Image: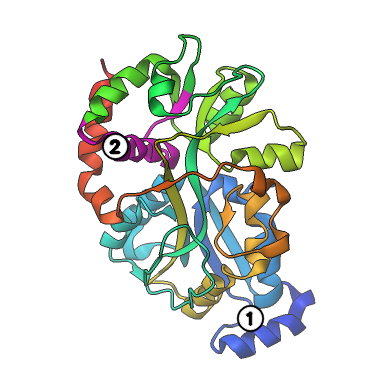
Amino acid sequence: MAPKVQVVGVALAALLVAGSVQAGETLTVYTYDSFVSEWGPGPGIEEAFEARCGCDLAFVALPGGVDILQRLRLEGQDTAADVVLGLDMNLMAEARALDLLAPHGVDTGALDLPIDWSDDNFLPYDWGHFAFVYDTERLETPPGSFEELLDAPDDVKVILQDPRTSVTGLGLLLWIKKVYGERAPEIWARLNERVLTVTSGWSQAYFSLFMNGEAPMVLSYATSPAYHMAVEGTDRYQAAEFDDGHYLQVETAARVATSEHPALAREFLAFMLTPDFQRHIPLGNVMHPAIDLGDELPEVYERLIAPESLTFTPEAVQAHRREWLREWRNAAAR
């Protein structure tokens, strides 16, 4: 995409602030496909950032956060990415170990997250809790805990995602491990009786199967009903709140150390914590914004469940991920 000549005046102001940012530069951002879809936050964010930078913001869409990490690992210092956007807190330690990322240098005082945040490399841009979303027309009384889900009638089936290829699938792996610890293999074995199928990614599970009525429940996010209520005007799809607590996901972006546009990358990361970026998150990425949007936050967010947050440290996830995946794989093979 060519530089936007119609915003030269705005761009000049941005250049004076940014110092070394050059008009006409292209900032390459690796992210996931739903972020840049026509209904996602990407198009609005691209328009808003290009209007202030006088540059070209080029998104490179990959299937998911796991794929972003793998692409960065394969390309190493030859990567074309200036910024990676879409690595959640469960992938941070593995990404940091690649030694390819640089400090973001952004003032994080505006962050509004359910947990304290202090990290020099990874800058949050949204957050949410993993949850089972259910169809109220097929399930009048949703389970209120894992135990209730495991003991549900035989026709209550769920659609899951593979924890090896999907951040939501990995989220459920960590959620069960956090709640049950050493009992996790037993819980996976019992949960198998509830599983209709396991998909490689969230989009296939949610849009291709759940929205077509293949099962009454799907692994997704506690924020997913916000889209249906605000955009489609229906309360049909809701999130089941578990007494166990829900595993938290914080999505982040980071600057690549080998970037040929370091000033522009820093400018984009600072832009992420402004209303011009964040107002596209609640109904575009269907997640909580990383700053307080005040009256700009859609009213439907007041109607979502507000569960207790469960987390492991990124280092604990890195240290045990293979072991916990092996537990899941062994249980799934029974």
Q: Is residue 28 above or below residue 191?
A: below
Dividing the image into 4 quarters, which one contains the C terminus?
top left
The residue positioned farthest toward the top in the image shown: 154
Tag 2 secondary structure: helix
Q: Which mark is residue 177?
A: 2
Measured as percent of width and height from the top left, residue 296 is found at 72, 60
Of label 2 and label 1, which has the lower sequence position?
1
Residue at image x 26%, y 30%? 184
Badge 2 amino acid: Lys
Judging depth in this view, the residue of 31 and 119 nearest the camera is 119
Q: Is residue 72 visible?
A: yes
Mark 1 crowd level (few <14, some 14–19, many ≥20, 10 Å Cα): some
Which residue is labeled 1 in the image? 23
Magenta span dominant secondary structure: helix
Measured as percent of width and height from the top left, residue 130 is found at 47, 40
Badge 1 amino acid: Ala
Tag 1 secondary structure: loop
Q: Which residues are magenta?
A: 159-182
